[in-house]
Amino acid sequence: MINIYNTNVETNQLEEKNKIQKGCWVNLVSPSDEEIINVCSELKISTDYVKDSLDYEEKARIDTEEDDGTVLFVIDVPVIEKEGDSYTYSTMPLGVIIVRDDYIVTVSLRKSIVIEKFIKSKVKNFVTYMKSRFLFQIMLENSSAYLTYLKRINKETEIAESTLKHSMKNRELLKMLSLEKSLVYFTTSIKSNEVVMEKTLRGKFIKLYEDDEDILEDAIIENKQAIEMGKIYSDILNGTMDAYASIISNNLNGVMKFLTSITIVLAIPTMVSSFWGMNVELPFQNNINGFAIMVAISILLTLGVTVWLKKKDMLD
C-alpha cells in the first residue's frame, strides 16, 4: 500500500496526494513488488533500501549511498497484537529513507503506531519538507512508545502476579512467560536503536540543525530511560517467575505428602480386616462380639496413626 502526503505551506496542514512531488512523504506499508519498483524508479533509489526494510529480521542500522546522498535509517518499532483477552508485544523494523533533500520514504511490514501518529497529525511541529526534523520526531515518538508499552507490560505483570497469589493456573504462568519474552524483544531493539541514534547525532549521515538536534537528544534520553526500565522490569519478572516456580514445587511436595499420609491411614483398616479373612484359627472368631471388636481395633489403630501423622505435620 502506498500513501503520499505533503504539508501545505500556507495552512501547515498534512494533505494526502495522488502523485509524488518534491518535499512529500511517501509511506509504504507491505508494498507489492510492482509498487516497490514503481516508487524506486520514480525516486531513483535502489530497491534494496525498501526490501531491506521489509525484512522482519533486519537489524537497526544506517546505510548510505554517497553518490546520490540517499540515506537509509532502520529502527525497530514496537508492535502490539491482541490474542483473546490478552496482548502480545514484539518489534518490527521501520525503514526511513531520506532521498537527497527532496523526499522522505517510510517503509514497514504493517501499520505502525508511530507512523499513525504523524498521519493523524498528532505530532507537534511536524512538516514533511523538514526531513531531519521528521526523522528525529519519528525516533522521539518511537522511544516514547517503548516507554508506554513497558509501563503496560509492568502493569500486566502485576495483574498476573496478583492472580497467581490466589490461584496457580497455567494460564497466568504462560502469560508471565509471554511478557518475559516481550521484554527480551524490547530491550534488544531499544539498545539497537540507541546505536543508530548515537551515530545520527554525530552529523555524519544527515545534516543537523540546532532546533532539530534538541529533538534527537530528547529521543536519546527517552531511549536510555526505556533501556533502564526494560532492565528493571525484566529483573523483577525473572525474580517473580523463579519465586513462583519454587512455590509451585513446594505446593506439589505438600500435596504428595498429604496423599501419602491419607494412603497410610486408609491402609490400617484394610490391613486389620485382612487378618480376620485368613482361613486359620483367629482371636475372637467364636465371640459373638468379634466383629465389633475387630472394627474397634481398626478405629483405634487408625486414630492412633492419624494423631501421629498430625504431630509430624504430614496432614497439613
Image (cartoon, helix red, strand yellow):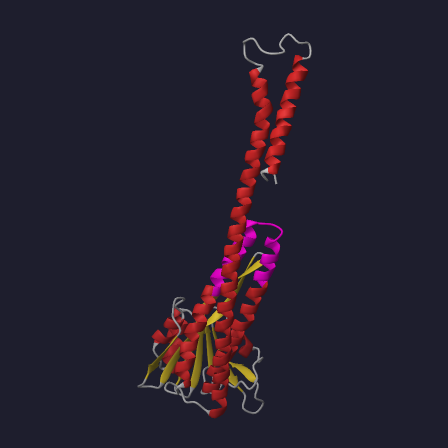
Question: Quadrant location of residue 105?
Answer: bottom left
**Range of the magenta residues?**
156-183
Above or below residue 286? Residue 210 is below
Near-viewer residue (183 or 52):
183
Above or below residue 96? Residue 174 is above
Magenta stretch: residue 44 in it?
Answer: no
Which x, y percent locates residue 206? 40, 86
Q: Quadrant of the C terminus?
A: top right
Which x, y percent locates residue 92? 45, 68
Near-viewer residue (161 or 135):
161
Near-viewer residue (110 or 186):
186
Question: Quadrant location of residue 207?
Answer: bottom left
Which x, y percent locates residue 194? 43, 77
Above or below residue 263? Residue 74 is below
175 lies left or right of 108: right
Tell me, yes or no, if residue 202 can be seen here.
yes
Image point 65% across, 19% down: which residue? 295
Image point 43% across, 75% down: which residue? 193
Image point 43% across, 89% down: which residue? 208
305 lies left or right of 178: right
Tell me, yes or no, if residue 134 can be seen here.
no
Which x, y percent locates residue 32? 41, 69
Above or below residue 272? Residue 153 is below
> Which secondary structure dominates the residues rendered in magenta?
helix
